[in-house]
Image (cartoon, rainbow, N blue to C red):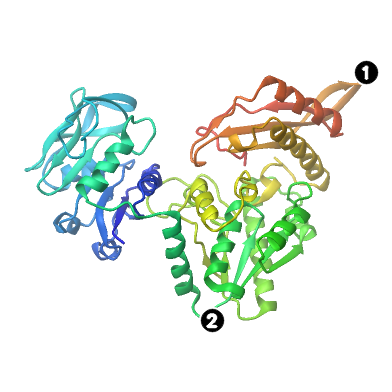
Amino acid sequence: MPSIVILDFGGQYTQLIARRVRELHVFSAILPGDAPWSDVAALEPGGIILSGGPGSVYDEAAPRPDAALYSAGLPVLGICYGLQLLVHQLGGRVRNAPRREFGRAEARLDPASPLLRGLGEREAVWMSHGDEALSLPAGFRAAGWSGEIIAAIEDRERRFYGVQFHPEVRHTEHGRELLANFLFDVCRLEPNWTPRAFIEQQIEAIRRQVGPHGRALCALSGGVDSAVAATLVHRAIGDRLTCVFVNNGLLRKNEFERVQHVLRDRLGLHLLALDESRRFLEALRGVADPEQKRKIIGRLFIEVFEEQAAKLGSVEFLVQGTLYPDVIESVSVQGPSATIKSHHNVGGLPEKMRLKLVEPLRDLFKDEVRHVGRDLGLGDDLLLRQPFPGPGLAVRILGEITPERIRLLQDADDIAVEEIKRAGLYHALWQSFIVLLPVRTVGVMGDQRTYGQACALRAVESEDGMTADWARLPSDLLATISNRIVNEVPGINRVVFDITSKPPGTIEWE
């Protein structure tokens, strides 16, 4: 199946480009920006997209694509830094812009360009650049401007195009239409990639990786990602998959019992349910640093899974429901993007582990996983659950973790979720939860002074977890949640509401 290969030069929006391409039902894959042409060609691309990036083409260590791509006869679309690469590598000139552009801008476009067909002569676009094209290579012409800055270029004969703005972000008014023009008019691809096609491809890939006799363990949490990953691998290798659900003592209230019912009875998976809470909490005693928490939990999970693999015998593979936001925040895998924090199933993994990883959802966003889950036959009651962090409540208890603080958070969080569901807002929110703060506050209850714990309510709206805005919950709902927590959870006497978006904050506090 012809694909679009996206060469990643470290832009934070790179995976968003891949997502937009997949939304248009064309398969996309991401490779490092400097990948050898042989690696690119192996994916049978029908076109190439050069991503944005934080660097300048004149930087000493500036990432550049293999020059062979320009003589391969394939269409190329350069976005932001990708446009500058086209200009620089093909003989034009790039300079440090006297007027940098960040944010919303208006571009004057030539709708006669195959790339810009159907767009208006003036369009709202999203800019984020410090360099600009000064003079174009032979064969190119400018097809768009933002003020005096070249905003779009084209060489129709070679099917090379570039835009200085970001069509993949929602702020660009008709970015989707521009990408569709590139895919269907310029590259002449067919919109034939769907969740069902992804399932078929992954089943084949899993069978190749695991082999005809290989066996695997799946780390199940009861959330959407691991349930979809388990079901997908079960389709591929059947009863050679054993699922392990570990109670690390940091689950939501009554979660251990509830999840077992769903996974074993509803999905028909072969499930081992292990209560390892004492082991995890002992290892976390006295630990307050969030990175240490994540790494301890990641190490202990792997120890448990390797122990179970040894008991079962001849198990070589570990299945995880890792998603792209986990990857991009944890490690730079395809470009020089920044590490935000370690995730227990990515950056928190030990350097040496016996089990080989199977991560069929690694390049998908949450909503894409839900589409795949529906095609696998999973119900919305499971698929529409809000995300829950792999390390569990450890990253929602700021400071030291103790059994008493776990109880406080479980009870408070259960109340908040119950009231949000009662208000009919649960599925409208990306996540909603309580964070227990390392703060004690003075209060008054029944004419008596109290000195209790403070907690924060976090509720965000998001499309994919990469960015998020705080949810404007009704004041009556906030009052109900606060009153119930303070009255029903002895030990908590203050509730605050987090109104920080991502960025600058992350969704989880740790």
- In percent of width and height, residue 145 lies at 19, 27
Residue for point 70% across, 40% down: 398
**Quick check: 199 left or right of 509?**
left
* Residue lying at the far left of the rendered structure: 138
Q: Residues within 10 Å of mark 2 (few under 14, many from 20)?
A: few
Give the label on residue 416, or none: none
Tag 2: amino acid? His
- In percent of width and height, residue 263 lies at 68, 60
Give the label on residue 447, or none: 1
- Relative height, residue 124 to residue 325 (above, below): above
Question: Badge 2 is on which residue?
Answer: 213
Residue 62 in sight here: no
Q: Which callout, 2 or 1, points to the residue nearer the camera?
A: 2
Residue for point 43% across, 52% down: 332
Tag 1: amino acid? Asp
**Secondary structure category for the residue under label 1:** loop
Q: Residues within 10 Å of mark 1 (few under 14, many from 20)?
A: few
> Residues at badges 2 and 1 in contact (C-beta under 8 Å)?
no
Q: Earlier in the sequence, mark 2 or mark 1?
A: 2
Give the distance between the C-alpha atoms of the residues marked 2 and 1, in whole angstroms: 69 Å
